[in-house]
Image: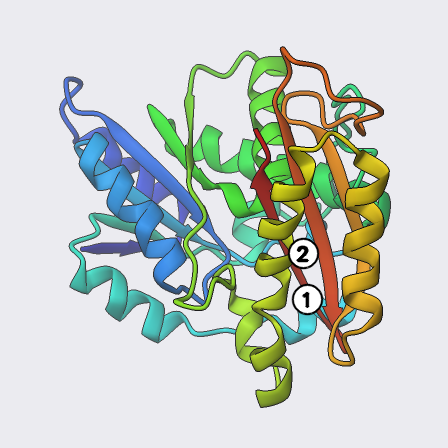
Amino acid sequence: MEVFESIKSLQQSLSAIGQNLTIGLVPTMGALHEGHLSIVRKAQGETDRVIVSIFVNPTQFDKKEDLVNYPNTLDADLEVLKSIGCDYVFTPNIQEVYQGKTRSESFDFKGLDQVMEGKFRTGHFDGVATIVKKLFNITKPDKAYFGEKDFQQLLIIKKMVALEFIPIDIVSVGIYREDDGLAMSSRNTRLSQEQRLAAPEIYQTLLKSKKLFQNGDLAKVKSFVKNEFIQNTELNLEYYEIADSETLKSAKEILADRKYRAFIAVFADKVRLIDNIALN
């Protein structure tokens, strides 16, 4: 495994790869867990060489305290990537990536960024798209891999690739869950013991809402979810939304030819957890 801090040294090494070999990119912000590793393994199974980037991107944080509190576990991350046979790791600093201009580009995501996460996190998706575009330009991968836990982000990146005419295949990877159903996240480590015991209720509520969805009464589903969290002393519901899986527009009725997903964001004190599930 080779580790690079500079763009130049990484690109020099990548230029030595034969043209017939494919490159897969897995962008991360570090604090790696089994969810990340499941994405890396998928990339390893589908491409000849895999690059994992580790960079905590400042432009996608709408709250400074979240950026400050984001865990730095670089040494442990490198050890675990080495243990699964990762080829390249890119660990640049802010100056290397942004060259003194730490700001986001502006993109027109055709409304994908105006709902759910975008509604509650101003500027977040411009920041995400900015760093992902930079990483694509630096590494020139054939495929890039993203987890479905951040499903809205996945669609945003696909839209950015289309808008910018970037010749990369975006591959989605299913949500990796703890044994009790909680979606794996680096934020889970910030939960208290009581919060961690309560957190699986998020996924359990999604499963129950999926069953209710089959009856076709959207108002009843939303009311059920709201009531579930009113009764929960550890978790506070920020939003629950049923949306079209392609446009992310809020469902007003259920159309037979459309696919829908349920999206949820919950606070455990100051720790924000998100999840989603396909409904049909």
Q: Residue at x 55, y 72 (%)?
A: 188
Toward the front, the furthest residue is 215
**Which one is nearer the viewer's eye here, 12 or 171?**
171
Q: Which mark is residue 58?
A: 2
Q: Is 137 placed left or right of 123 in the picture?
A: left
**Label 2 crowd bin: few (<14), some (14–19), many (20+), radius 10 Å:** many
Does residue 190 lie above or below 9 as drawn?
Answer: below
Q: Which mark is residue 276?
A: none
Q: Secondary structure at mark 2?
A: helix
Q: Residue at x 75, y 68 (%)?
A: 267
Query: The residue under label 1 is which amino acid type?
Result: Leu
**Label 1 crowd bin: few (<14), some (14–19), many (20+), radius 10 Å:** some
Q: Secondary structure at mark 1?
A: helix
Query: How far across and how far down the image is residue 214, in percent?
Result: 64, 33
**Which one is nearer the viewer's eye here, 29 or 254?**
254
Query: How far across and how far down the image is residue 1, in percent?
Result: 18, 55
Q: Considering only order in the chain, which callout, 2 or 1, is on the residue closer to the N terminus?
A: 2
Q: Quadrant of the C terminus?
A: top right
Q: Residue at x 78, y 66 (%)?
A: 229
Q: Quadrant of residue 171?
A: top left
**Which one is nearer the viewer's eye here, 157 or 263?**
263
Does residue 33 lie above or below 253 as drawn?
Answer: below
Q: Quadrant of residue 130?
A: top right
Residue to which mark 1 is pinned: 67
